[in-house]
Amino acid sequence: MAYDSAAMRRRFLDAAFEEFVQYGLAGARVDRIAAKAGASKQAIYSYFGSKEGLFDAVLTQRHLEMIEAVPLTPEDLPSYAGAIYDYLTAHPGYARLTMWRRLERQDASAADIEAYRTKLGQLQEVIAVDTSKWGVIDVILLVLASANAWESVAPAIRGLDPDAKDDADRRVRERRALVASVAASVAALSE
């Protein structure tokens, strides 16, 4: 049977994703990742150079998957925020992974910076903001922070909504509040 390098890389990335979501970069163990992937620790270093290199590869892969699943819609930022909320609801590991990244690494990667530059360029083409008061970066950060807000709060706190009938109803209510607040915020920033 022929060796499938792409399949091996995918197994490493999937196993590492689970490990990093659970333990973060500092707590993750290369030996556990290798065991889950059915390979040796040396193979991980051969593919990724280091645990940090593997973490970066996992972040990049998962971020690109999210960008593909939820493309920026600069002409409809409330819907974009809702789509991000939906993605995070369906992929809670992604939200946790990005929280680990923020905790363990303060600097943005070159890929992160380029992704934001792209979004800013797309936004500048369609949204008018009073740049004497705020910038287009403020708009995108407000939208992204709003969309991520619920996933950054403990489920027990989110469950305190006395008017939600059940978890599904609570999520509908959260999403509705998000979309309305982003619409109001974007309107206010565009005045």
Image (cartoon, grey):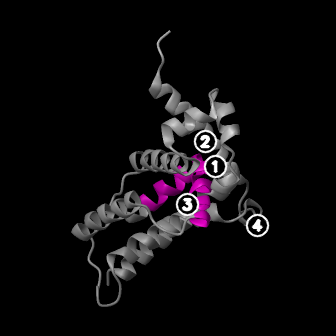
Which label lies toward us, 1 or 3? 1
State the SS at label 2.
helix
Residue depicted at 62% across the width and 28% down the height: 39
- The label shown at residue 176 is none
Disc 2/disc 1 C-alpha distance (Å): 6 Å
Is residue 173 visible to us here?
Answer: no
Q: Residues within 10 Å of mark 4 (few under 14, many from 20)?
A: few
Residue depicted at 56% across the width and 53% down the height: 88
Disc 3/disc 4 C-alpha distance (Å): 16 Å
93 in magenta: yes
Disc 4/disc 1 C-alpha distance (Å): 29 Å
In this orientation, which residue lies closer to the viewer: 69 or 181? Answer: 69
**Residue 11: image location, x then y, percent:** 56, 31
121 in magenta: no
Q: Residues within 10 Å of mark 2 (few under 14, many from 20)?
A: many
Q: Are marks 4 and 1 in contact (CB under 8 Å)?
A: no
Query: What's under tag 1, amino acid-wise?
Result: Phe
Which label lies toward us, 2 or 4? 2
- Residue indicated by mark 2: 16
- Of callouts 1 and 3, the N-terminal one: 1
State the SS at label 3.
helix
164 shown above or below 55: below
- The label shown at residue 160 is 4
Query: What's under tag 4, amino acid-wise?
Result: Leu
- Residue indicated by mark 3: 175
Q: Give, as a single range, the part of the protein colored magenta.
A: 80-104
